[in-house]
Image (cartoon, helix red, strand yellow):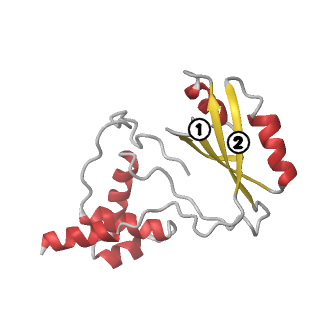
Amino acid sequence: MDFPPSLNGNKTSNKYSKPRSLDLIDLRIISMLCKDSNTPFVEIARNIGISDATVHMRIKRLMVEGIIRKFTIALNYDVIGYDHLAFLGIDTKPGFADIVISKLSLLDPVLEIHEMYGRFDLMLKIRAKNLEEMRNIIENRIRNLPHIVKVELLTVLKSAKEEQIIPLDAEIDALQKNLL
């Protein structure tokens, strides 16, 4: 579920502004939600030692400020049949990276897009059910987009670790030590 920049209609959030400092309570709430975004507010409150209303207000503020962008789930893609993972290095015509990115962003099989400095202009992460579908995505949906000069497929043989969350335990420990 994606959240708007502001839940109360005020457009005060700027995605380029420096985020405010997160306190210990914010970090502990975020840490618990990172481990399981379905954790009830009451359980978070009990674990931290605050009221569930405080948890609710803190989470709402973190969403409005753009710190929490969405709540999601982690799937086992192999089990549901999307077991072909690849990265795609793409070179674009100079000055056209933003246009290509906007077109690639519309493609569902493209899970991630990263602008790079080095071997490629862009690095994409894509998933497919099989090699035929992977080929179709690359040849018929990506390679024929305007302003793409070169495409190189990097097939993943095995994923040892695939996480989207950075653990906040060290930051929490540091803040707790400063409070003592």
Residue 108 visible at all: no
Q: Nearer the viewer, residue 160 or 110?
A: 160
Residue at the far top in the pictured view: 95
The image position of residue 74, as x and y in percent, is 60, 64
Tell me, for residue 120, which label it has, or none.
1
Amino acid beneath label 1: Phe
Disc 2: which residue: 152
First in sequence, mark 1 or 2: give its number.
1
Task: Name the residue at 34% across, 78% down.
Answer: 47
Q: Nearer the viewer, residue 50 or 63?
A: 63
Q: How many marks?
A: 2
106 with respect to 60 (left or right): right
The image position of residue 179, as x and y in percent, is 14, 71
Give the SS element for disc 2: strand
The image position of residue 159, as x and y in percent, is 64, 66
Amino acid beneath label 2: Glu
Q: Residues within 10 Å of mark 2 (few under 14, many from 20)?
A: some
143 with respect to 8 (left or right): right
User: Are circles 1 and 2 on residues that touch, CB within 8 Å?
Assistant: yes
Which quadrant holds the C terminus? bottom left
Q: Nearer the viewer, residue 3 or 103?
A: 103
The image position of residue 2, as x and y in percent, is 53, 47
In the displayed structure, 172 sits above or below 71; it is: below
110 with respect to 28 (left or right): right
Residue 122 visible at all: yes
40 with respect to 10 (left or right): right
In the displayed structure, 114 sits above or below 131; it is: above
Q: Residues within 10 Å of mark 1 (few under 14, many from 20)?
A: some
Residue at the far front in the pictured view: 119
